[in-house]
Image (tube, rainbow, N blue to C red):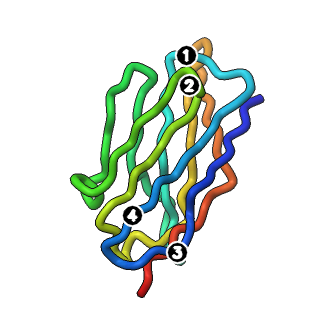
Amino acid sequence: QVRLVESGGGLVQPGGSLRLSCAASGSIISPNAMGWYRQAPGKERELVAAVSSGGSTNYADPVKGRITISRDNTKNTVYLQLNSLKPGDTAVYYCNLGFKVLGRQYNYWGQGTQVVVSS
């Protein structure tokens, strides 16, 4: 079993910054990918950014240039640095860890952390 625990959400003014963290524990298989998704009220969950255990990154177009994903493999932790935040970034942010075992995909989710961008 894998457990993901997120932290770092909160209320921030437009233009501000936040840093989200997600620590994974349990039976983690490498290689894997860790990522952040977000879900705004009334909308579907969408990918924000992902990073592989080898360090390759992928960003959604709406956040490119404003958000940086990184990970510390020694701590099984992924970070999301949110800069120049906009009200449209308001959402619950979920951490995800995925890996394959014998061709079967496994995905695990954190409980989510709320980010509110408002003046």
Instruction: Provide residue 69's location: percent of width, then percent of height.
Output: 39, 42
Residue at the extreme right of the image, as rendered: 1
Q: Judging from the image, what secondary structure is the residue with disc 3 in? A: strand
Q: What is the C-alpha distance between the residues marked 4 and 2? A: 30 Å
Q: Judging from the image, what secondary structure is the residue with disc 2 in? A: strand
Q: Amino acid at mark 1?
A: Ser
Question: Residue drawn at (55%, 16%), measured in percent from left and top?
Answer: 30
Q: Amino acid at mark 4?
A: Ser
- The residue indicated by pointer 4 is 17
Q: What is the C-alpha distance between the residues marked 1 and 3? A: 34 Å
Q: What is the C-alpha distance between the residues marked 2 and 3? A: 32 Å
Say which of marks 1 and 3 sits in front.
3
Q: Amino acid at mark 3?
A: Leu
Instruction: Provide residue 80's location: percent of width, then percent of height.
Output: 44, 48
- The residue indicated by pointer 1 is 30
- The residue indicated by pointer 3 is 11
Figure check: 30 above or below 80: above
Label 4 vs 2, first from the N-terminus? 4
Q: What is the C-alpha distance between the residues marked 2 and 1? A: 7 Å
Q: Residues within 10 Å of mark 1 (few under 14, many from 20)?
A: some
Say which of marks 4 and 2 sits in front.
4
Label 3 vs 4, first from the N-terminus? 3
Label disc, if present, on residue 99 of the rendered structure: 2
Say which of marks 2 and 1 sits in front.
1
Say which of marks 1 and 4 sits in front.
4
Label 2 vs 3, first from the N-terminus? 3
